[in-house]
Image (spheres, rainbow, N blue to C red):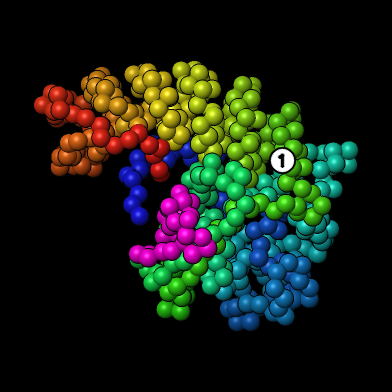
């Protein structure tokens, strides 16, 4: 599998906008940015126990009296990370310990994963919420809150990755949280109710893979998505393993596209209706959390509801709505986005990025105009999906712009790659330097020489990150 060159600004464009969505962030991502709520901790933990911490030499053990979640043990040894673990767990501590299991080891990585006995009711309430969220949707008894929204989004997520041979590998997928939800092809599974498997053989190079559940899915875009994420997820998984030689050389990952029909007494339709209703909330954090939950659910039907939020008075809500549309890549949003790309209030760079990801030729005239106005994301868009006349637009911008020059150069290089002409060595070399010098005449000379015979020979298509 090959991956196209990435440009830093393209990645940042999504990361910056997506950060606004993440007030109810994924537990693993939250480790890097914010404290975890009790509901997030319960979701994140593979094992929740009540017991006592005991020091034996340099090692820390938990003597378990009760297991609230996960496999039962009488005692476990915590993986030591030196003095860091010692700041979270002390010999003689009594209470509740929330633990994640990775590569067969038991980890506590945050102080919020250790709770005194008095936290019992709060912890048990969070466990109940995950088991059956339905009672918590009654607004007469439970004011709207981010915790229940988080539970709904995660509980009804349409994508579940499992691996029997390497359970921790499925967890590793989620370290690439932003890419994961940005890459998933939502449109594929709108009304699909199946799962399929990717069998990896002879792992370290991933040269062979077979879609073994149903051969008709071998060309499915989800297979390409899975392979790309398996490669880098397994690299990290292998690097973290204490004994790489013991890892299996063959394993199977299952991708399940079916959201559960019910979680406890709560149905999928009830959950999504609750989230749509939160768009009316006066609390902007609630609106943004609902958008994040819908992104986890990957439901194309939500797109028409989200479009109304593009006119929301709060900037962060508008960015969150656009970030969901970026992940959804739904063609039905194109007319609305074309109307907004010239308006500075609607984050035109992000709008151009969305239109590029969708790849609808109807957006090309608007993207050309945006490129003429200096929209860097539009440079990439017309480089990826533009016609031959777009080359002239980029050449002109290269001559007049004093910034985004690397972006313009990269877009020109992409267009040459899509043309009937071969790339020249200087095009690669020029991209490697720290600065693209506007006075450098190479592009202008190349265009003057090749303009007459230049043709685009590949079909315009949505860029894959």
Does the segment drawn in magenta span residue 121? no
- Please state if 304 lies on the left or on the right of 273 as rendered: left
The residue sitting at 59% across, 43% down in the picture is 190
Q: Is residue 415 above or below residue 209?
A: above
Specify start and end residues of the magenta stretch as a single range. 206-231
Q: Quadrant of residue 142?
A: top right
Q: Residue at left 70%, top 73%? A: 71
**Relative to 135, does residue 214 appear above or below in the rendering?**
below
- Pointer 1: residues within 10 angstroms few (<14), some, or many (20+)? many
Q: Is residue 304 visible?
A: yes
In the displayed structure, would residue 382 be above or below residue 245?
Answer: above
Q: What residue is disc 1 on? A: 272
Image quadrant for the N terminus? bottom left
Determine if the magenta segment contains residue 228: yes
The quadrant of the image that shows the C terminus is top left
| Residue 268 in picture, x, y percent from top left | 73, 46
């Amino acid at each position: 599998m090959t991956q196209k060159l990435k440009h830093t600004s393209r990645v940042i464009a999504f990361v910056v906008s997506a950060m606004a969505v993440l007030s109810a962030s994924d537990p693993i991502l939250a480790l890097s940015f914010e404290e975890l709520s009790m509901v997030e901790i319960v979701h994140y933990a593979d094992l929740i126990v009540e017991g006592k911490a005991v020091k034996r030499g340099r090692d820390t053990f938990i003597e378990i009296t009760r297991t609230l979640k996960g496999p039962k043990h009488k005692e476990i040894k915590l993986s030591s990370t030196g003095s860091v673990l010692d700041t979270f767990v002390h010999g003689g501590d009594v209470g509740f310990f929330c633990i994640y299991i990775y590569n067969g080891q038991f980890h506590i990585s945050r102080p919020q994963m250790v709770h005194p006995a008095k936290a019992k009711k709060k912890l048990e309430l969070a466990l109940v919420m995950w088991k059956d969220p339905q009672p918590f949707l009654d607004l007469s008894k439970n004011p709207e809150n981010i915790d229940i929204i988080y539970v709904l989004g995660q509980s009804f997520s349409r994508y579940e990755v499992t691996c029997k041979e390497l359970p921790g590998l499925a967890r590793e997928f989620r370290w690439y949280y932003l890419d994961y939800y940005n890459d998933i092809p939502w449109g594929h599974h709108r009304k699909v109710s199946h799962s399929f498997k990717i069998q990896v053989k002879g792992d370290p190079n991933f040269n062979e893979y077979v879609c073994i559940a149903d051969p008709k899915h071998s060309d499915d875009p989800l297979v390409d998505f899975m392979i790309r994420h398996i490669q880098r997820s397994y690299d990290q998984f292998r690097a973290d393993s204490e004994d790489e030689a013991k890892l299996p050389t063959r394993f199977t990952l299952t991708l399940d596209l079916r959201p559960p029909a019910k979680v406890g007494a709560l149905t999928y339709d009830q959950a999504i209706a609750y989230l749509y209703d939160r768009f009316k909330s006066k609390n902007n954090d609630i609106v943004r959390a609902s958008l994040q939950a819908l992104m986890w659910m990957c439901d194309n039907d939500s797109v028409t509801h989200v479009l109304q939020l593009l006119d929301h008075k709060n900037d962060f809500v508008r960015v969150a709505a656009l970030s969901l549309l970026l992940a959804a890549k739904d063609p039905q949003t194109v007319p609305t986005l074309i109307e907004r790309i010239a308006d500075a209030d609607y984050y035109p760079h992000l709008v151009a990025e969305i239109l590029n990801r969708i790849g609808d030729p109807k957006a090309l005239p608007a993207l050309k105009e945006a490129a003429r106005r200096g929209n860097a994301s539009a440079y990439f868009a017309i480089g990826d999906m533009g016609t031959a006349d777009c080359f002239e637009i980029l050449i002109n911008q290269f001559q007049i712009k004093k910034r985004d020059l690397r972006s313009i150069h990269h877009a020109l290089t992409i267009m040459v790659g899509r043309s009937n002409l071969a790339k020249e060595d200087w095009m690669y070399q020029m991209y490697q330097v720290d600065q693209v010098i506007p006075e450098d005449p190479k592009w202008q000379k190349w265009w003057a020489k090749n303009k007459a015979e230049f043709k685009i020979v590949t079909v315009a298509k949505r860029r894959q990150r």
